[in-house]
Amino acid sequence: MAANEEEINSLKDEISQLQYNIAYYKTNTYKEKVARAKLRYVLPGETAVAVSYDKVKTEELKADASPLQISRPNYVYWSMYFFGNR
């Protein structure tokens, strides 16, 4: 009996989430977001900028990031990033 009630509640939650998604997909905000992402839509007066993806540099970074080279705690690296001190 309790398992059935849990399943009913789960299905009700899923239905409400799907109803929310349907309402969101009908909004102009979502339509504009999709148009910008998939169709490269820009508004008049805006300038679209294309940035290339540097595959070689990414592969070099992956090769350099072995776990053996990390010798400091993460917060030290963040401090170095934000404040520039070592």
Image (cartoon, helix red, strand yellow):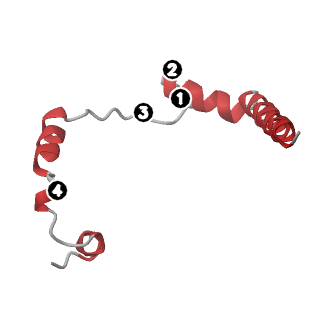
- Label placed on residue 36: 1
First in residue order: circle 3 vs circle 4: 3
Please rate how many residues cluster around mark 4, counting C-alpha atoms within 10 Å: few if below 14, some from 14 to 19, many from 20.
few
Q: Amino acid at mark 3?
A: Ala
Q: Is residue 39 above or below residue 46?
A: above
Circle 1 sits in a helix, a strand or a loop, which is it? Answer: helix
Q: Mark 4 or mark 2: which is in front?
A: 4
Judge left or right: residue 25 versus residue 54. right
Pick whichever, 41 or 85, lies toward us. 85
Do the CB atoms of the residues marked 1 and 2 lie less than 8 Å apart? yes
Residue with the mark numbered 2: 39
Residue with the mark numbered 3: 48
Q: Mark 1 or mark 3: which is in front?
A: 1
Residue drawn 16% across the image and 63% down it: 70
Please rate how many residues cluster around mark 2, counting C-alpha atoms within 10 Å: few if below 14, some from 14 to 19, many from 20.
few
Circle 3 sits in a helix, a strand or a loop, which is it? Answer: loop
- Label placed on residue 67: 4
Q: Position of residue 77 (x, y in %)?
A: 24, 70
Judge left or right: residue 35 versus residue 28. left
Q: Is residue 2 above or below residue 35?
A: below
Q: Position of residue 19 (x, y in %)?
A: 81, 31
Q: Mark 1 or mark 4: which is in front?
A: 4
Gap in angstroms between the C-alphas marked 4 and 2: 40 Å
Circle 4 sits in a helix, a strand or a loop, which is it? Answer: helix
First in residue order: circle 1 vs circle 3: 1
Gap in angstroms between the C-alphas marked 1 and 2: 6 Å
First in residue order: circle 2 vs circle 3: 2
